[in-house]
Image: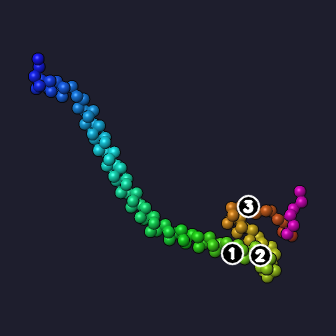
Amino acid sequence: MQGCKECCERCVGSLPWASLIATVLLYMGVALFCGCGHEALSGTVTILQNYFEHLLTAGFFVFGVLLLVEGFFTTGAIRDLYGEFKITACGRCLTAFVSHKPPKKVAVGGQEGQR
């Protein structure tokens, strides 16, 4: 019968030490990556909350001004005041920019071309 010492030496000697050390290092690296990623994301959220709100507010202000100008250029009263073609062309271009739709092609006389 073998003693306890010989049994433990045989059992410990047959362990794949390189694989065990590599596994421990792998899990330590994953834990470090997750911890650093969490810290970086919480800092990023703080930065976005502080600065993105101001950029978003400024962007909506500019968009509101564009919509106001579009409303001015597409009304009939402004056409009577400044002339027909230039103002409506500007209004159409501004509408196309704001709504991302191309304007209709209109002849210089204000009538659609015949096909």
| Residue at disc 3, secondary structure | loop
Position of 64 relative to 42 (above/below): below
Q: Which mark is residue 75?
A: 2
Q: Tell me if residue 60 can be seen.
A: yes
Tell me which residue sits at (29%, 44%) in the image: 28
Q: CA distance from mark 3 to mark 2?
A: 19 Å
Q: Which residues are magenta?
A: 110-115
- Amino acid type of the residue that numbered disc 2 sits on in the rendered structure: Thr
Q: CA distance from mark 1 to mark 2?
A: 10 Å
- Amino acid type of the residue that numbered disc 3 sits on in the rendered structure: Pro
Q: Are marks 3 and 2 in contact (CB under 8 Å)?
A: no
Position of 48 relative to 87 (above/below): above
Q: Quick check: 12 left or right of 26?
A: left
Q: Quadrant of residue 114?
A: bottom right
Q: Which mark is residue 69?
A: 1
Give the quarter of the figure containing the N terminus: top left
Q: Quick check: 12 left or right of 91?
A: left
Magenta stretch holds residue 37: no
- Residue 40 position, x and y percent, is 38, 57
